[in-house]
Amino acid sequence: MQKLNPPDWNLDHLQVDDSAPEWFKTAVNTSVRSNYVAVNGCTIHYLTWEEPASSLQSQKKPGLLFVHGGGAHANWWRFIAPSFMSDYKVAAIDLSGMGDSGKREKYSAALRAEEILHVLKAAELGPKPIVIGHSFGGLMTMRFGADFGEKIGGAIIVDSPVLPESEKASEVPRRVLSVQRYYPTFKIGLERFRLLPAQECKNTFIVDFIARHSLIETDMGWTWKFDVKAMGANRWSEPFHEHLAKMKCPSALIVAENSGIVSAVTADYMSDLMGPESPMIKIKNSHHHIMLDQPLSFIEAVNDLLADWGKFKHIKEIV
C-alpha cells in the first residue's frame, strides 16, 4: 500500500488571496485535521473539523461527510465545512485517485462506496450521519446509498447528472483525461487550472484557493493531484439511475439554476426516481459548482435540509 505524507498547508504557495472576504479567511484558517485510513489496499485521506469541546459533547454530535466531485479534493469543502462544526462532527473525503489519497490499478463506484463507509467509521461520525456529494461525488453517494444507505441518516445529492433517455442525445460531452500533464513551475501549473465542466466564477479567490490545493510537486515537475486513470470515461458508466432509485435512506437534491449539466427535465426525472418525500432545492444565480458561485446560499440550503428534512416536500428556491 502506498505510504503518503500528510499535506503541509503552511507552504507559501498555498496562502489565501488577500482579496478574499473575512468570512472565507476565517473558514479556511479554521483548525482542520488530516487523517488516513486503509481501504482495500489503498490509503484514503480525509479531513476532520471539530469544535473544541469535551469528548462527551463531541460524541453526542451527529456526523456530516462531504464528498467532492471528479478530479477535485477535500479542500473544496474547507470554506464550507466550518459552518457546521457547532452542531456536527464534520469530515470530507479524498476519493481514491484524487486529492491526497492513494491510487488504484482499477477504480469503481463500488470501491468508492466502501471508501465512504470506512471514512464514516474512522472519523467516528456516529450511527446515522449525513453524506453530501457534489457532481461525481453525488454519483458515488448514490452508489453508497444503494449499498449501505441503511447505515446513514440521509444523502444530499448536489447537481449530479442522472439523465433521462430524452436528454442523452443533447448531453454535453464529458471531458476524458488520458495524459498526466506536468509543468516546470507551480505558477505555470496554477495558470492552467480550469473548472470541469468549464464555467465562469466571480469568486476568483475561491477558485484560486482550490487551484493551489490541486497541484503537487513531483520529480517530473508540478502536476494535478488526480490520477488520470481515475478520470476515464468508465467513471460514468454505471446505471446510476438504478442506484438513485434504490437508495436505502432519506434523500434530497440540490440543483443549480444555471447548471449546464442538470437541466430542469433532468432534475424532475431525478426527483421522480428519489420519490415524493425527497425535497429539491434550487439555488439561484449558480452554475454547476454551486459552492464556488454561491457558498453562503449553499450553506443555507444544507442547513435548511438538516434542520427540517420534511418541511418542504418538493421545490424551494434560495436566492
Image (cartoon, rainbow, N blue to C red):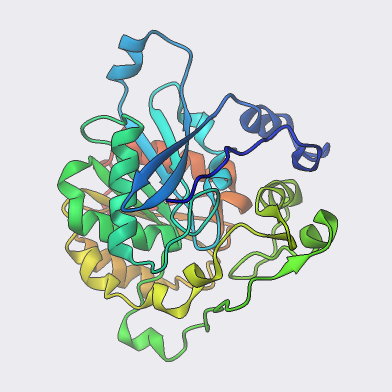
Q: Is residue 227 visible?
A: yes
Nearest to the observer: residue 118 or residue 146? 118
Q: Quadrant location of residue 180?
A: bottom right
Q: Position of residue 105 (x, y in %)?
A: 42, 67
Estimate the x, y position of residue 100 in percent, counting from the top left. 54, 48
Percent from the top left, x then y, of residue 205? 75, 46
Circle count: 0
When asked about the image quadrant of residue 18, the answer is top right
Q: Residue furthest bottom?
A: 169
Instruction: Give the left or right position of residue 68, taking residue 119 as reference.
Output: right
- Whether 218 is drawn above or below 258: the answer is above
Closer to us: 86 or 124: 124
**Residue 276 appears in which quarter of the rendering?**
bottom left
Is residue 159 visible to the viewer in this orientation of the structure? Answer: no
Residue drawn at (66%, 27%) of the image: 26
Residue at coordinates 18% horizontally, 42% vertically from top-left? 151
Residue in view at x 50 percent, y 63 percent: 70
* Residue at screen point 52% across, 84% down: 173
- In the rendered image, residue 35, in percent from the top left (x then y), is placed at 47, 34
The image shows residue 219, relative to residue 129, as above or below, that is below
45 vs 180, left or right, is left
